[in-house]
Image (cartoon, coloured by chain):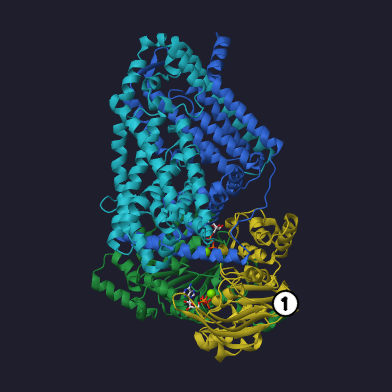
Chain colours: A green, B yellow, C cyan, D blue
Amino acid sequence: MSHHLLEFKDVRFRYPDGTEALKGVSFLITHGESVGIVGANGAGKSTLLLHMNGYLLPTSGSVTVGELPLRKETRPEFRRKVGVVFQNPDDQLFMPTVFDDVAFGPLNLGLPPDRVRERVNDALRQVGALALADKPPHHLSGGEKSAVAIATVISMEPDILVMDEPAASLDPKGRRSVIGLLNSFAHSKIVASHDLDLILDVCARCLVIRDGMIVADGPAPEILSDATLLAENNLELPLTLQGRAAREGTHR
Amino acid sequence: MSHHLLEFKDVRFRYPDGTEALKGVSFLITHGESVGIVGANGAGKSTLLLHMNGYLLPTSGSVTVGELPLRKETRPEFRRKVGVVFQNPDDQLFMPTVFDDVAFGPLNLGLPPDRVRERVNDALRQVGALALADKPPHHLSGGEKSAVAIATVISMEPDILVMDEPAASLDPKGRRSVIGLLNSFAHSKIVASHDLDLILDVCARCLVIRDGMIVADGPAPEILSDATLLAENNLELPLTLQGRAAREGTHR
Amino acid sequence: MHMADALLSPAVGATFWAGTIGTIGYASKKLKEHLDDRKIPLMGVLGAFIFASQMINFTIPGTGSSGHLGGGMILTVLLGPHAAFLVMASVLTVQALFFADGGLLALGCNIWNLGFYPCFVAYPLIYKPLAGDGRSPRRILLASMASGIFVFQAGAFSVVLETLLSGKTALPFTTFLLMMQPIHLAIGVVEGFVTAGMIQYVRAARPEILDSSASSAPLAAGISFRNVLIGFVAFAVVTGGALSWFASAHPDGLEWSIGKVTGMGELPEQKRGIPAALKSVQEKTAFLPGYGFKPAAGEPKEKKQERPAWPNVDAGTSLSGLLGGVLVLAIAFGIGWAIRAYRRYNRPGSP
Amino acid sequence: MSFETAYSGIGRLDRLSYRDTVIHRLDPRAKVVATMLFAVVVVSFPKYEVLSLLPFFLFPILIGALGDIPAGFIARKVVAVSPFAVFVGIFNPLFDPGVVAIAPGVSVSAGWISFASILVKFSLTISAALLLIATTSFPGICRGLRRLGIPALFVSQLLFLYRYLFVLIEEAIRVVRARDMRAFGKKGAGVRVFVRIVGTLFLRTVERAERIYGAMLARGFRGDVPSMRSEMFRPADAIFVLAAGGFFALCRFVPVPQMIGRLVGGLAG
Ligand SMILES: Nc1ncnc2c1ncn2[C@@H]1O[C@H](COP(=O)(O)OP(=O)(O)OP(=O)(O)O)[C@@H](O)[C@H]1O
Ligand SMILES: Nc1ncnc2c1ncn2[C@@H]1O[C@H](COP(=O)(O)OP(=O)(O)OP(=O)(O)O)[C@@H](O)[C@H]1O
Ligand SMILES: [Mg+2]
Ligand SMILES: [Mg+2]
């Protein structure tokens, strides 16, 4: 099972322009965990996620999946183990049809055609988008695009699924179905979002990142009900925990 | 006061590719009202808002502000009365500096330079962004961009403020400050959003649009607590009304 | 293949600046006559798009090396020649400033080399006739390939021409040409292929974009610009012709002359007499526009004798000059260092 | 990743250009004119001139130091863009073998000298161009160009280009990132996928332009991009241009290093 461990050890990262986006981040995520990452705009969430499959390499410190350390040469293997879905599905769907798009990864992995077909069908079925296979991506609705973007990654059968802001600009039903999708994914998953209610619905554990450092790490229900901690991080209680009556009093 | 009335009468709109995005929309918004527009992805919200300042002209039906009917020739005057803030602040801030951007509207109105300067300063002060005047928009954070986008419209002193998804991708604190900003704007305002909690915080009245038609129109607290109506429209109860206990039961 | 300041003479730089500014003025004027307002933001954003697309690398089949989009042709097809020229000029201006590709003086040349040929030569004379109504994929591919190849050949040829007219390099004309043209043939083929692919992609997804660009560049504008075009082509032919005549008249061109002139024994003679006087006058006026063309056009010998101070001085003077040079540099860097040190001292705590 | 590095370079230059120093405060026109003059004068030196060019380093050094621009950053960028000039220049030693004495008993081929001259000119002109943009915001340069008579239409869309440069490059980077994530270094990065990606990006760009146009209309746009900036050309700006011009003229017509060398040599001897 150790191959599903994801470990960051004192990871620092500086963008070429000098911005220090990560300032020593350490954590360990074990098999089957679901972890939320929250923090203010610019706190470093996306930068952190980009390390998880080697798109960025740490300036110092180490990232490992199972026994595999992240290095330039190990990136392809890393990417097979860790699948990342980015924020905007429009950035991810660039092939002429949904089928081609979902098949892109498996084909590049060098799988034989019928295995690819199988994987594509499985992935699309899992996100409930099998019927869309022959459509061009730009004709999909927002929610459909999100689902397909997730399928493009699932089709590579990663051990760990990583998502950046998975439900932005979806209508509440689309958002709810993304939540359902995430909950049905059995492996480890890591989700960064400003939607704390979604984190609470999907994740058992939660990291709070501020200014490139982890400032809290614990069970999601606990962290996300700590109003002071949240306020310090430009966050607030999940709306479902706020309730309306309380808000009415303070904000109107 | 009649000049602040905004009326849609049986407005239909068909995109050049044949999509019928509005199928007979009628409503009347009176002075000082705050109206939320909600609906599923693709229901027609953005299309509706684009009619409010004549970016689109109805295929049939009529739009009037006060006594002024929307026609090709009246669009400039229309735009002076109705200020629209679009969804993505990056599309909205197109000038090289914040100051130039906020000054763009007043200058086009033909105001003399010192009146323009006054308006720009007022508008920036109102959104708390006076210190940003000389910055280029691409150096702003998400929340700052949203605030400046609102200032660009406020500086034209519209009678009616219209906003499409004003708080998307902001962290909870940024979202809260946009809510504060909207509540401080005294004139009529119209807000389209999937964030039903925001609508509930900002708007007294709410329209539900489905498939290009208005399917409900009433006081926001009433409409937004009608679970059946909402579910029919790919929506769900605002999270603050859901509360956590209820959710726990049904979804975990 | 950006031209660089350091390879240019002021005269050549100024000439191409003049041509470029003239064309910008001309294109702006033409565009204003029937401008669709919509195009103003579209042009700017498409300029940014060219940069964005250059950030996307791809593997050139068979070579393993990576290429990127030049963009001149695709812009012309989508925007029409006048707008496309302005966009290319902006792209290159930003490149000259932010990427330091070439420098300010060379910007005129670069806009000319990369903007003029696709917009005002390849598009009307190659692309349009070959592509016809633009509905046949095969014709689009043919037209794009031919234009892509032409544009890069013409651009590369201009670089060679500009470099040699400036006289800063010792590269023989033919050698330089033989190095530049084949490389740019490959680049042109790839550009043509990518251009065709994009046009077809756009045609499939949003045909109205292509149709509107075709209709908003009415032929009326083409008539007067054909005159301009003829002028420019004549200009290119004359300068090119003069240059190749020069190159063939002296097959070993510059080597011959330099070998001859730098022979030690001849130096003292050169210090006196009319040639020396001419030379000193020339040096003093060297930064005035117009000087570079004289030797290139018809007096190649004069060019050879445009001997600078260097080989003329004896070793002793040269040594003191070297010493002076080192001192001057030391002083300059010392001043810079002192200012920085002063700054740091006055702002403790800041990096 | 290399394109991201190139991109971060622009980002850094852009951020530097919004600082506030003596040099940043000068009128953009003054800096544009001085830099252009600088390039012309430097380039006007003949092929074999090296020593007389050295005093010109004072200009970029002063601008860089007074403008508080990191010298290493500029130097690295100059080196990064040098390949073409070096490529062309390196042939001079090959094709120009004549021998020149530079000190008693020491001689080199003339080609090396003209190559050195190209390198010096290159460093001078490129660093000056970089320093211009590092000390003058791009909108400032555009306003300067406008006042120097460049057509308004051209300048407006130059400003649009600048505004959306960063937005679109980031968009492109995100798409490339998504592709590379699933390409495993395979044919995913080939021309066909490239054409699709660029095509998609192009359509998104056009759609964005439409949205921007909508936003402009919403704020009363009727064909002219207005501007109310009217900086005065202050005496300080004039002094800057005159001083720079005087310095260039001096160094152009007077062989400063040789004179200093002779002076020092005279003192020593
Ligand atoms: N390409 C880049 N170059 C330089 N700095 C960057 C780059 N990308 C991000 N940054 C900076 O790094 C820091 C962390 O950014 P990051 O995108 O990781 O934040 P985030 O937590 O994902 O924010 P958001 O909630 O807005 O998505 C910020 O200060 C940001 O400005
Ligand atoms: N430019 C266009 N051309 C053709 N059809 C369009 C265009 N823009 C929108 N549509 C279609 O019109 C309908 C209404 O779209 P609209 O953007 O108004 O929805 P919306 O309610 O704003 O959705 P969202 O919540 O996702 O923003 C959709 O079916 C959409 O596909
Ligand atoms: Mg992020
Ligand atoms: Mg919308």
Q: Chain of mark 1?
A: B
Asked where in the image residue C334 lies, by quadrant, the reply is top right
Count of number-bearing discs: 1
| x and y, in percent, of residue B96 in the image | 60, 54
Image quadrant in which you'd find residue C143: bottom left
**Res B64 quadrant in image:** bottom right
Residue located 63% across and 85% down the image: B27
Can see residue A16? no
Find residue B8 and report its horizontal and vertical position in percent.
Answer: 62, 82
The percent coordinates of residue B166 (x first, y second) are 61, 71
- As rendered, which of A1 and C104 lies closer to the eye? C104
Question: What x and y, as percent, mark residue A89?
Answer: 44, 69
- Mark 1: amino acid: His
In the foreground, A40 or D110? D110
* In front of the other: A168 or A244: A168
Secondary structure type for disc 1: helix
What residue did someone put label 1 on? Answer: B3
Badge 1 residue CB within 8 Å of ligand 2: no
Q: Is residue A30 visible?
A: yes
User: Which residue is drawn at the image coordinates 50% and 29% (left, top)?
Assistant: C289
Quarter of the picture containing the N terminus of chain B is: bottom right
Residue drawn 69% across and 60% down? B110
Q: Residues within 10 Å of mark 1 (few under 14, many from 20)?
A: some
Query: Which residue of the protein is positioned furthest toward the bottom in this rendering?
Result: B228
Q: Nearer the viewer, residue D126 or A89?
A: D126
